Amino acid sequence: MAGSLIQDHIAFDRLLPRLRRIAVLGIKPESRADRPAHIVSAYLHRAGYELEPVPVYYPDVSEILGRQVYRKVADIPGRVDVVNVFRKPADLMPHLDDLVAARPRLVWLQTGIRDDDFAAQLLAAGIDVVQDQCLMVEHRRWRSSR
């Protein structure tokens, strides 16, 4: 079964209450707390989501936001609801096999991140996709509308 491309506020509003466990691919550590990949992650952590950090760099970092670091999404025990992605569009394809192996319900590409071919391959694997949207912005909007 193919995944769905999720693109509008109505779909986001249906989706957000069901998310609990979020892997963050490309998360930045506390030493880079001024970067969106840390700011958004810290917000989601404070909002009560179970965060699973998957930094791409920082090999010496073993913990971010008090959570154990994983080097691949597929290495995280159990299933995650969403993988929130902070990677440049040109750097997405090397993560495709890992994401397909992990089988999250949703891959969320943050603001400014769009790759239609990458998204099509995730959709074909049965994984829902959001492109070029900020999960923090959508969560704040959803929370304020309840």
Image (cartoon, rainbow, N blue to C red):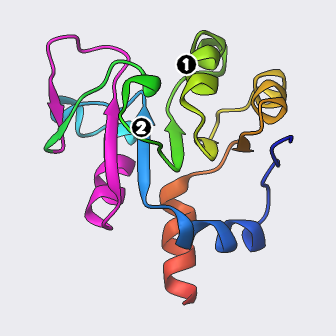
- Secondary structure at badge 2 equals strand
The picture quadrant where one finds residue 76 is: top left
Closer to the camera: disc 1 or disc 2? 1
Left or right? Give the position of 57 relative to 33: right
Compared with 15, 37 (above or below) is above
In what quadrant of the picture does the N terminus appear? top right
Residue type, label 1: Asp
* Residue shown at 80% from the left, 44% from the top: 3
Residue type, label 2: Val
Residue 10 is inside the magenta segment: no
Q: Nearer the viewer, residue 84 or 104?
A: 104
* Residue shown at 83% from the left, 22% from the top: 117
Compared with 66, 94 (above or below) is above
Asked if residue 29 shows in the view, the reply is: yes
Residue stretch in magenta:
38-65
What crowding class fits label 1: few (fewer than 14 Cα within 10 Å), some (14-19), or many (20 or more)?
some
Reading the image, the residue beneath label 1 is 98
- Horizontal and vertical percent position of residue 19: 51, 61
Q: Nearer the viewer, residue 130 or 102?
A: 102
Reading the image, the residue beneath label 2 is 24
Label 1 or label 2, whichever comes before in sequence order: 2
